[in-house]
Image (cartoon, rainbow, N blue to C red):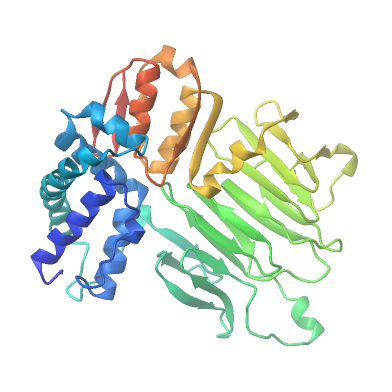
Amino acid sequence: MLRDFGKLIELAKKLARTILLRERIDEVDTSEELNQDERDYIMQKLAEPSHWLERSRLKKEVDETHAREWERLRANTVADSKLRYLKIMVKVAAIFIGIAVCTYFFSSGNFTEEGTGALPEQESITLELENGAVEKLSKSDNRLFKNSKGNVVGMQKFDQLDYTQAEERSSSSDSDKKPMGYHKLTVPYGKTFQLVLSDGTRVHLNAGTSLKYPVRFIKDKNREVFMEGEAFFDVQKNKEQPFIVNSGSLGVQVLGTQFVISSYPEDAFINTVLLEGSVGLYKNKGSQKKDKERYTMLEPGFMGAWNKEEENIAVTEVDTDIYTAWTKGRMVFSHMKFEDIIKKLARCYNVSITNNNVELGEETFTATFDIKIESMEDILESFKRNYGFDYDIENDKINIY
């Protein structure tokens, strides 16, 4: 447990400043108040999108009578005359947040007697190893992963797993003929994570995504991975070994290029957006032999949308920045239906959203949000100003009327 109640209050005050003065959570220095384990765990929890909703609710309680002033704050313009007011509000907010943080940490038992605690399973990034063991990953970790022989196959440094620096293996040609060992990285809603495969290919996994991949690619065989969710791929070029992404009923084959695949089970389409290079899309029948004549080729700046029900591909020209914004901490919607927008928001903020307003669901919106500083409630309020509706928030559940 935390040894000093005063430390938690000080941390709560700093958290209040991140809400009211828009200081980034990772810029708040807690080195003097907490030991390493406590600091890593608490700062990780407070920075998670899944906890922004509760922080937003507390902010609303504190500031419900000053809505207009907060609109000015949203534009990041704080007049000198408001600074004294903000300092007072920081102290008030700290009381509310301190109570909430104390209640969370002390009553939920997230810390063991030694001062460390395991993250709830449903909120953890996990790595399934070759032997089936599952490891929970924290973005504050630096660790090594080994195979059954004790050789290092992967290294984690904070929010990235790297398989390019594996220990030297046997030079025997037989080593290239052995079956590939696979790892499976799973990123829950509300988080993102990065991966560097053994060939140097970089993958940025979005919220609610899993990727199964070999710890090393075997010579003279296709580089093949399996994914569900959404990911940005920057594939290392290798003409001798095509890179293949299997995503449900769609296969994507490339030699070296940058592209995004979005393939969530609840979506009607699997979308592939090409930034550079070229990719071939095809119906994935599980066969190693692909009929190249059936490939749908994409050019940079185009998206191939695979209709799961009709099993066909439609190709359209798109603004690729819209589909890669999430890798930079932004959400961009362009003439998108509200019912599709809330799906993306639910994944990003790890909340449940129920829309009971049928007409609203069909409305289209164009908007850009910075998810690093804007809470779920901030975004709802923005939509509410453009289209009048009501909503209520209870824990991590949102109902729209």
Residue drawn where x is 19% and y is 40% of the image: 58
Query: In this orientation, which residue lies closer to the viewer: 233 or 220?
Result: 233
Residue drawn where x is 47% and y is 36% of the image: 344
Vertical comparison of 175 with 215: above or below = below
- Residue sticking out furthest to the front: 80
Vertical comparison of 350 with 200: above or below = above
Query: In this orientation, which residue lies closer to the viewer: 184 or 297?
Result: 297
Q: Residue 303: horizontal and vertical position, in percent?
A: 71, 35
Q: Is residue 384 left or right of residue 304?
A: left
Residue drawn where x is 31% and y is 47% of the image: 22
Query: In this orientation, which residue lies closer to the viewer: 11 or 141?
Result: 11
Q: In which quarter of the image is the C terminus?
A: top left
Q: In this view, does 258 lie to the left or right of 41?
A: right
Q: Residue 319: horizontal and vertical position, in percent?
A: 66, 34
Is residue 120 something one can see in this rendering?
no
Q: Residue 104: horizontal and vertical position, in percent?
A: 17, 54
- Residue sticking out furthest to the right: 293
Q: Residue 297: horizontal and vertical position, in percent?
A: 82, 39
Vertical comparison of 292 with 336: above or below = below
Quarter assignment of residue 211 = bottom right
Is residue 78 something one can see in this rendering?
yes
Residue drawn where x is 40% and y is 65% of the image: 138
Q: In which quarter of the image is the N terminus?
A: bottom left
- Residue sticking out furthest to the top: 359
Quarter assignment of residue 295 = top right
Quarter assignment of residue 311 = top right
Give the total number of marks visible in the rendering. Answer: 0
Q: Is residue 105 left or right of residue 234?
A: left
